[in-house]
Image (cartoon, rainbow, N blue to C red):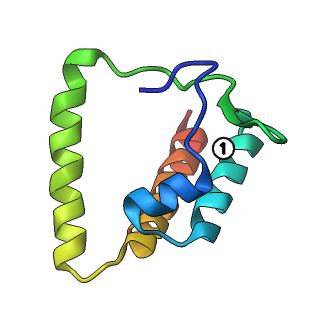
Amino acid sequence: MLRVGDQLPTVREVVAAIVINPNTVLKAYRELEREGLVASRPGQGTFVKRTLGEAPQADLPALRRDLLTWLAMASAAGLDGESVLALFTSTFQEAQHHNEATA
């Protein structure tokens, strides 16, 4: 879990760790910056400015297990890392818009 002031890994580090297209990582970092969650400091990196509300720590292991199950299903369906991120992002955004519309 990242906290305010923590530095995000570089794009190169993310690409090496999860074998994903660098443009996907750059797009995700830009989106985080647009949302005001991170700030880029030229020559220094990208840092967390604020966080979203934290889930209770007791809920995290169950959420992680469910997410790992979902990722395994996505992999079994033939999705690569970039497709998984695209599906997750579009579904997440759709859910946010739905929540905002019903709030």
Left or right of residue 17: residue 39: right
For the point 22% across and 39% down, the residue is 64
Instruction: Give the residue pinned by disc 1.
Output: 32
Q: Looking at the picture, how far across and down is residue 14, in whole percent?
A: 49, 54
In the rendered image, which quarter contains the C terminus?
Answer: top right
Furthest residue toward bottom: 78
> 68 left or right of 11?
left
Residue 31 against residue 38 in the figure, above or below: below
Question: Which one is nearer the viewer's eye here, 18 or 70?
Answer: 18
Going by the numbered disc 1, the residue's amino acid type is Leu
| Residue 95 screen position, x and y as percent | 47, 50
Question: Which residue does the image show at 51% across and 63% down from the upper left?
Answer: 90
Q: Residue visible at 47% across and 52% down?
A: 92
Residue 52 picture location, percent across and down: 54, 26
Give the left or right position of residue 75, taking residue 52 as reference: left
Question: Is 5 located above or below residue 87 in the figure?
Answer: above
